[in-house]
Amino acid sequence: MRLAGPLRIVALVVSVGLTWIVVSILLGGPGSGFPRIQQLFTSPESSVTAAPRARKYKCGLPQPCPEEHLAFRVVSGAANVIGPKICLEDKMLMSSVKDNVGRGLNIALVNGVSGELIEARAFDMWAGDVNDLLKFIRPLHEGTLVFVASYDDPATKMNEETRKLFSELGSRNAKELAFRDSWVFVGAKGVQNKSPFEQHVKNSKHSNKYEGWPEALEMEGCIPRRSMAS
């Protein structure tokens, strides 16, 4: 009977010691907060790190443009169903959503120094008047950037003067542009060389992606701003 008291004390000490060990294990040690307990209530799915999304830059470009460059993306129309798009510095200049595109040539004129839109218009090259287009591109100021995206038919109403003016803006393909070709182009008034920003696909029943039309074209890049002295 006299041993009952000491035994109870020993049992109490052992119980307290075991409790402390268990608590220390669950808490993960001094100063570590509650990571072990949190792990017990965290599902394996929630602990998996999601794959990082690929970053997109202005106009959806995969990389940023250098300083003093303008980011752009030009997409031609698809057949006569999906309208073209012209994006510059993350601003949509022309698109079906903006309701300012149409059959023929879709052209945006941009200040080459500031990057600001001057004017955007669509010219019907199937049933329209080519003189409207000529009046638009004849009086361009030096350094004006010209963004062009075709939709349906870009060339039926083209004449020699029209082709010559686009060639002077830096186009290689304007002279051979034909009925229902796909064409995207970025040029400028006063350039000395041909533009590196141009794509052209001929309308051919042997290679057309759509019935009666070639594939749509998509072009992106970075254009150097023109200096005030240029």
Image (tube, rainbow, N blue to C red):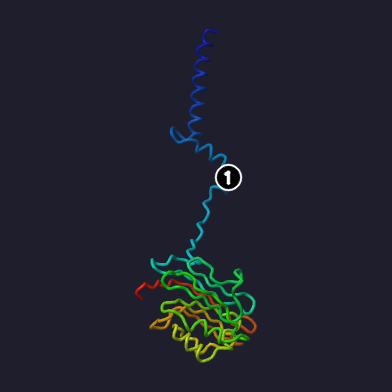
200 vs 71, nearest the viewer:
71
Query: Residue most toward the bottom?
Result: 160
* Residue 5 x/y as whole percent: 52, 11
* Residue 32 x/y as whole percent: 45, 36
* Residue 2 x/y as whole percent: 52, 7
| Picture layout, residue 64 above or below residue 180 | above
Residue found at x 55% / y 78%: 106
* Residue 3 x/y as whole percent: 52, 10
The secondary element bearing badge 1 is classed as loop
Report the amino acid beneath label 1.
Ser
Marks counted in the figure total 1
| Picture layout, residue 99 above or below residue 124 | above
Q: Which residue is mark 1?
A: 43
Density class for disc 1 (Cα within 10 Å; few <14, some 14-19, many ≥20) is few
92 vs 76, nearest the viewer:
92
| Picture layout, residue 161 above or below residue 148 | below
| On-image quarter of the N terminus | top right
